[in-house]
Image (tube, rainbow, N blue to C red):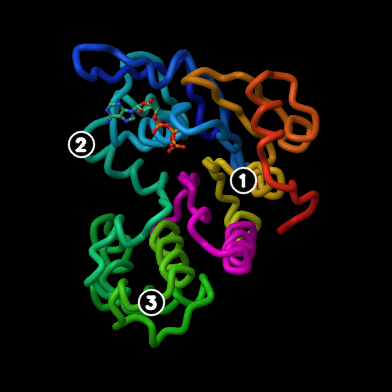
Amino acid sequence: MSLLTVSNLTKRYSRGGKTLAAVSDVSFHIEPGETLALAGPSGSGKSTIARLVLRLIEPDGGRIEFEGDDFLALGGSALRARRARVQMVFQDPLAAFNPRATVARVLDDPLRIHGVAPRTERPRRIAALLERVGLAADLAPRAIHEISGGQRQRVAIARAIATKPSLIVLDEAVSALDVSVRGQILDLLLDLQREERIAYLFISHDLGVVRAVAHRVILLDAGRIAESGDARTVIDAPQSAIGKALVAAAPRLNRNRP
Ligand SMILES: Nc1ncnc2c1ncn2[C@@H]1O[C@H](COP(=O)(O)OP(=O)(O)OP(=O)(O)O)[C@@H](O)[C@H]1O
């Protein structure tokens, strides 16, 4: 059984009296500990798929099975319990969190909300999470806006792993970082994946990064799957028109780990 199975997912938006099919008949699966990348031009539906998988928005059609459950049918406490198992990291933690909140507060929230640890134990858990993502414990009282972009993304990852998820959706999670910090964050993600067997749905417009970290890739074009397969095979020899265009437009592709 796959960790996540998405079948015939469809999402339409209405805008100015017109209907736009943002995602059309998209199907894929993710195995435990695997990285599946979604790549494609701007507006091809990547973030919409991320939001559907996180159940931040509801689809117009299709099915999502997560850890054996009909994810779209879950409600109440069953949904809350499953939500702990699928976490997210977005491009900009300043937008995702209250910039004035302390690092400790940002990490305490998931521990409290999902009942991961009682109040007295949480400071210890927070220190352990900071250490796990390579941050010093004395960062805990600092405000989110007072730390660097790389440190903020490490806090976002610490928050995502706080509830011991089996899947993390990473939506352009390294895109805003400069190249050396990006490499460090990718290394951290790969370490966590190896140790905790976390699967990633890795959304990126950067084919070099996708080639370096993903096992498989799906190329999207106007809400539909244009091509999919082994990440290196697809990126080194794309078959679809959109794949060829994306590779041609990509800056020098890094053939190895960044
Ligand atoms: N809330 C919304 N209301 C109306 N249309 C939307 C909404 N969100 C997205 N869209 C449209 O749906 C399509 C897919 O958007 P989506 O954000 O999923 O693409 P994307 O591949 O993530 O793009 P990008 O790389 O620019 O982030 C686009 O045409 C977009 O304009």
Residue tagged 2? 76
Which residue does the image show at 60% across and 54% down from the upper left?
193
Whichever of labels 3 and 1 marks the residue nearer the N terminus, that label is: 1
What secondary structure is found at the residue carrying circle 3?
Answer: loop
Residue range in magenta is 163-191
> Is the residue marked 3 within 8 Å of ligand 1, measured from its CB?
no
Viewer-side residue, 27 vs 19: 19
Q: Are marks 3 and 1 in contact (CB under 8 Å)?
A: no
What secondary structure is found at the residue carrying circle 1?
Answer: loop
Viewer-side residue, 230 vs 146: 146
Where ligand 1 lies, by image quadrant? top left
Q: How crowded is mark 3: few (under 14 residues within 10 Å), some or many (20 or more)?
A: some
- Would residue 82 be found to the left or right of residue 250 on screen? left
Whichever of labels 2 and 3 marks the residue nearer the N terminus, that label is: 2
- Would residue 190 be found to the left or right of residue 165 on screen? right
Vertical relation: 169 (above or below) 225: below
Closer to the eye: label 2 or 1: 1
